[in-house]
Image (cartoon, helix red, strand yellow):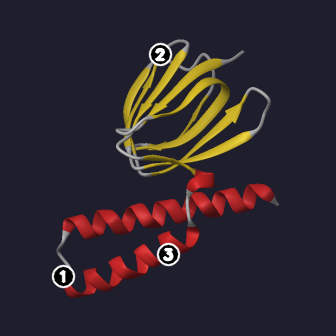
Amino acid sequence: MYCYLNVVSMEKKIFSGSILKIHITGIEGELGIYPGHSQLLTIIKPGLLLIVHINKKKEHIYVSGGILEIQPKLITILSDIAIRGIDLDRNNIINAKNNTEKLIKKNYNNKKLSIKLSQAIAQLKVIEKMDKSKI
């Protein structure tokens, strides 16, 4: 049994197709969504979206948070930012994280910097999960 998934960012549709299951982090914790899941509308946290395709191949996508909607045969994820794991650049993310940490030390209460730092950390976690799944 399969269900259909759409992952849409503000810039573009990043994924559309039939899947076996997904794993994602909601505000209440980790969610494993399989075909036939009950209907749900929830907020998702920045981090990993793991898609298991119908051929059982796994795909990793970073999402910056957003909305998850589950209908009987359709899952929709709307996120400000969605980036395929293979498109994440570890060195650029580490540099951005380090620079943001330096700026935070100088300007501790800046909310935008805190958000930028949490996004970099979440992107690095996606890369780490991808690395572990290759082993």
- The answer to whether 95 is drawn above or below residue 1 in the figure is below
Q: Which mark is residue 94?
A: 3
* N-term-proximal mark, 1 vs 2: 2
Q: Amino acid at mark 2?
A: Gln
Q: Nearer the viewer, mark 1 or mark 2?
A: 1
Residue in the foreground of this view, choosing between 84 and 54: 84
Which of the 4 image quarters holds residue 87? bottom right
Q: Nearer the viewer, mark 3 or mark 1?
A: 3
Q: Are marks 2 and 3 in contact (CB under 8 Å)?
A: no
Residue 91 falls left or right of residue 27: right
- The answer to whether 130 is drawn above or below residue 37 in the figure is below
- The answer to whether 125 is drawn above or below residue 31 in the figure is below
Residue 4 falls left or right of residue 83: right
Residue 70 on image: x %, y %: 47, 22
**For the residue labelled by badge 1, is the local secondary structure a helix, a strand or a loop?**
loop
| Screen quadrant of the N terminus | top right
Please tell me which residue is depicted at 48% across the width and 69% down the height of the picture: 93
Mark 2 → mark 3, Cα distance in angstroms: 37 Å
Residue 83 falls left or right of residue 128: left
Residue 66 falls left or right of residue 127: left
Q: Nearer the viewer, mark 2 or mark 3?
A: 3
Please tell me which residue is depicted at 20% across the width and 66% down the height of the picture: 111
Q: Which residue is mark 2?
A: 71
Residue 43 on image: x %, y %: 36, 38
**For the residue labelled by badge 2, is the local secondary structure a helix, a strand or a loop?**
loop
Q: Residue furthest right?
A: 135
Q: Which residue is mark 1?
A: 107
Residue 11 on image: x %, y %: 38, 39
